[in-house]
Image (tube, rainbow, N blue to C red):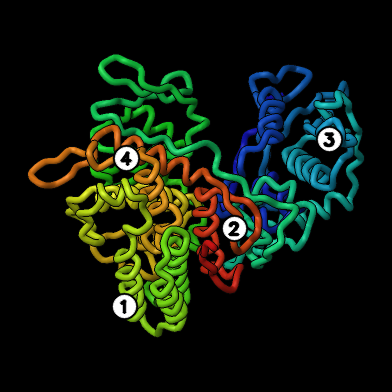
Amino acid sequence: MNPIESISAPESVPISLVAHTLYCERRTWLEAVGERAKHSYAMRVGDADHKRTHNPSASNQNQLRGIDIHDDSNGFHGRIDTADILPNGALKLIEYKSTPVRFKPSVTKATRIQLALQTIALEKAGYEVAEHSVFFKTHHRHVPVEIDEVDREEALSAVARTQEIILGSEAPPALIDDPRCSRCSHVSVCLPDERRGQQDLHQIRASDPAGQALHLSTYGARASLKDGRVIVQKSGEDLASIPIEQVSAVIVHGNVDLSSALQRELLWRDIVIVWCSYGGRVTGWSRSSYSPNGLPRVQQHVASFEGRLGLAREFISSKISNQATLLRRYTKTSSTIKEMRTLQKQAMEALTIGELFGIEGNAAGMYFSNFQECFNEIAKEQLKEFPGRVGRGARDPLNICLNYSYALLQSEVLRAVVACGLDPHAGFLHSSNRNKPALTLDLMEEFRAPVADSVVIGAFNNGEISADRFHHIDGAYRLDDVSRKALIAAFERRVATEFRHPVFGYQVSWRRAMEIQARMVLGYLDGTQSQYIGVKIR
């Protein structure tokens, strides 16, 4: 008996997606739009268990393995695990499942539907299916299954519903207080409670992205891939060796080379690469052509063109609120803080983007006029030449460090934006003119004070960075390697620090909070939530 040839029509849906529909229709939508689940331990075990069963070369005269099947008329396709060939030539389908030992090896409805669809496809291909069984690998036990006409009807109905979901223009609503969410591999991208603005979460805690950002900042170094590890070398000397599974993003600072094999592997794994100048300015990024949420991304461009003043107000209001809170923590300028709180309220009532920028500018002037008061006496002495906030072309130590810290923040927010499929260039506050990553700059606003400014304040106050260690050329300061690496280390510590999310009430790292906020913008755009609420620290 020859393996069955796989032919899938364009509108055909995979049986695995039908199984998602039976679990949760919103999960089907997420899978269909390209949202990848976090690879849990259970998923890894399942992949390992299916490695041999999905290998067609392991088939023999008594058993078929990993055979592709399809039913063009009903519009589904899939792959069987194994099919034993009985003495009379009929098939016995065997589905492999991994279930924790503490759970009973019971056959779920999704598994019955899966076997029913496999049976329908095989019968259309001319095969007789006489028996069905589920083998629970953890328990080493076969459980026989009887597939009847009701199962077949429910299976085809589930296929039709799956097709409706993926062709629909709106995402199905998230489940409400459902125990399935706590076990769902998609919970960190679905955010069911957050979509409804629920503030008292107990069952679910959104997980951090797997791994950490890898910063490559040693001038002249080269990063390559070897045996599943990122190897960083300079002049033949190994500087670092990191398993690629632990890398969630790669930030390249200045003249550092990446091998083509490493870049290709990062793209295959959908890991963002960000290139920065040696001074910290983001010069570009790359990511896989695979990108989730294509339709919401189109909606984002339409909304960006039309304008969404509500989003812009929240970005600026949150920024001013966090600036005022940071001054309250470090200074005694109560009158300034009171004025900034007034500006925070005015931002929520602004009628135009121009008015918003005027309010933001007034608040920034007050904030940076008092910014030096956030430093201890030793740091104040080193930073006495601070001329006020200066962006590109800064020549003093404090502004140089702020600019570098903002570039690190931009890299992190950029990663969060592209992780959920949004376009970094289509924003709602900043203009997309001159090819600026407008949405990234929008989302950065609420994180500038609590993340980037906090990093710089802490680094100077703790003595990790000192003005006398900067290069001093022609009256201008330049970051040296020691100060640059110290600033990167301080930034990584900060984004890994956990805090209680002011809206949702659970502990979350600053890095994860950036992706949550990006997904809140996504929810606002695709209609699954009514408003966007920025992060405001207390």
Residue at which label 3 appears = 129
- Callout 3: SS: strand
Asked if residue 391 is positioned above or below residue 407 in the image, the reply reads below
Q: Amino acid at mark 3?
A: Val
Residue at which label 1 appears = 358
Asked if residue 477 is positioned above or below residue 343 in the image, the reply reads above
Residue 46 appears at what percent x and percent y?
Answer: 71, 32
Instruction: Measure the C-alpha gap from mark 2 to mark 1.
Output: 29 Å
Q: Earlier in the sequence, mark 1 or mark 3?
A: 3
The residue lying at 45 percent from left, 75 percent from top is 341
Q: Quadrant of residue 217?
A: top left
Residue at which label 4 appears = 465
Asked if residue 295 is positioned above or below residue 494 in the image, the reply reads below
- Quadrant of the snapshot with the C terminus: bottom right
Instruction: Measure the C-alpha gap from mark 1 to mark 3.
Output: 73 Å
Q: Amino acid at mark 1?
A: Gly
Residue 20 appears at what percent x and percent y?
Answer: 71, 50
